[in-house]
Amino acid sequence: MDDEPIFVATDLSVQAGVAARWAHRLGRLLQRPVVPIYVVEVSLANWYRGEYEVRDDVHKREETERKVREWYHREVDEDPDDVRVRVGTPHRQLGEVVRKHDASLLAISASGKSKLGQLTFGSTSLELTRKPPCPVAIVHPEHSDPGTDGDIMVGTDLGPSSEAAVAFAVELSHRLKRALHVVHSSQPARDLLENEPLLEPAHDQALAEDRGELLKRTLDKHNEETASVTVYSDIIDEPPSQGLCRYLEEHEVIDITVLSERIHGGSRAALLSSVAMRCVQMRTSTVVVIPDDSSEERLEQSLEEDSTGIPLEEADREQDT
């Protein structure tokens, strides 16, 4: 498992360097190789400048790889373990590379330009966190060193859709020796049934006890890994988009937030807009979105066409590196 690489997406900008430093530090802590990926995006401008030549021209590819290595060394002050250069649609190419190489994580920088937490790659980051091909970390500029003493939080719906996220957070806290917060947030049944007769107090208490038992079972699955770390658990009577974000606001010590791509059986879009994206926009931690192992859906396979008229299936064809 320690050989599974950590990839970092780059557009060779200063903003992308935030993710490079975070990924490099994490790679050294976990003893995993770190590989930057640079994608020449499908566009008329790149076609006009001859950027697509990196796919077939050895000298052009070597020149581009050199630029990626120089960027990484400038940002990290060390050389990368390897580099990847691709041509095509960024989220497709990034997804293809990390799946092909069994990546343990893909890191992307969150822009520090606005309080809205806009993402450096815009729609690319949105697509990757909506349909993560592997764990995808949106690295915040103020939380770019996983070697700090900050805590790790994972949100759980106490069901199968959160199992991978909990396992990832547990392993990370175990390997980094960091305190772990396991938090469940859901709207109380009495609020969901506001138009129905109120639940009897005994029934409401039973529901609370059920959630408590489920949370205990979730933690019991990882007793061995959590034996050496401090674990906090909490149940919040609020919708996830409110409860988890409020928990982050009240616990400034949290440096990394781990969430599943799905929660409570909801859609990825709902999770992304109501929880993950809110966490990114809050600028309180680096956010890692974990694929739901219970789902078989992955990146879209339907053919698209860029406004330039260049078929994306041609640009996204299999590439050697």
Image (cartoon, rainbow, N blue to C red):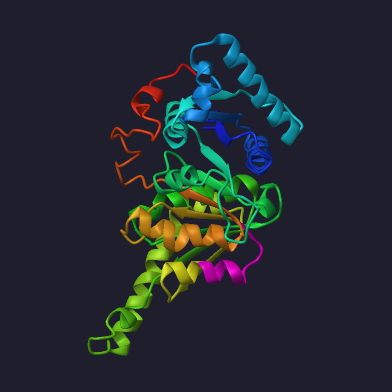
Residue 232 visible somewhere in the drawing: yes
In reply to whether residue 249 is colored magenta, the answer given is yes
- Give residue 234's position: percent from left, percent from top: 50, 70
Residue 41 visible:
no
Q: How many marks?
A: 0
Q: Which residues are magenta?
A: 245-255
Q: Residue at x 56, y 30 (%)?
A: 37
Q: Relative to residue 175, is residue 241 depicted above or below?
A: below
Q: Where does the image place residue 305, in percent across and percent down from the top left? A: 34, 33
Image quadrant assignment for residue 69: top right
Vertical position of residue 101 compared to residue 141: above or below: above
**Viewed as shown, does residue 57 lie left or right of 150?**
left
- In terms of depth relative to the viewer, which is nearer, 165 or 321? 321
- Examine the image and state in which quarter residue 209 appears: bottom left
Q: Is residue 279 magenta?
A: no
Judge from the rendering whether residue 39 lies leftward or rightward of residue 218; answer left or right.
right
Identify whether 319 is placed above or below 110. Answer: above
Instruction: Identify the residue shown where x is 34% and y is 58%.
Output: 159
95 relative to 115 in the view: left or right: left
Residue sitting nearer the eye, 179 or 320: 320
Quadrant in the picture for residue 198: bottom left
The residue drawn where x is 46% and y is 62% is 275
Q: Residue 272, image x and y in percent? A: 43, 56
Residue furthest out toward the left: 196
**Position in image of residue 321 (x %, y %):** 50, 19
Is 113 on the left or on the right of 5, as rendered? Answer: right
Toward the top, the furthest residue is 58
State whether residue 207 is above or below residue 50: below
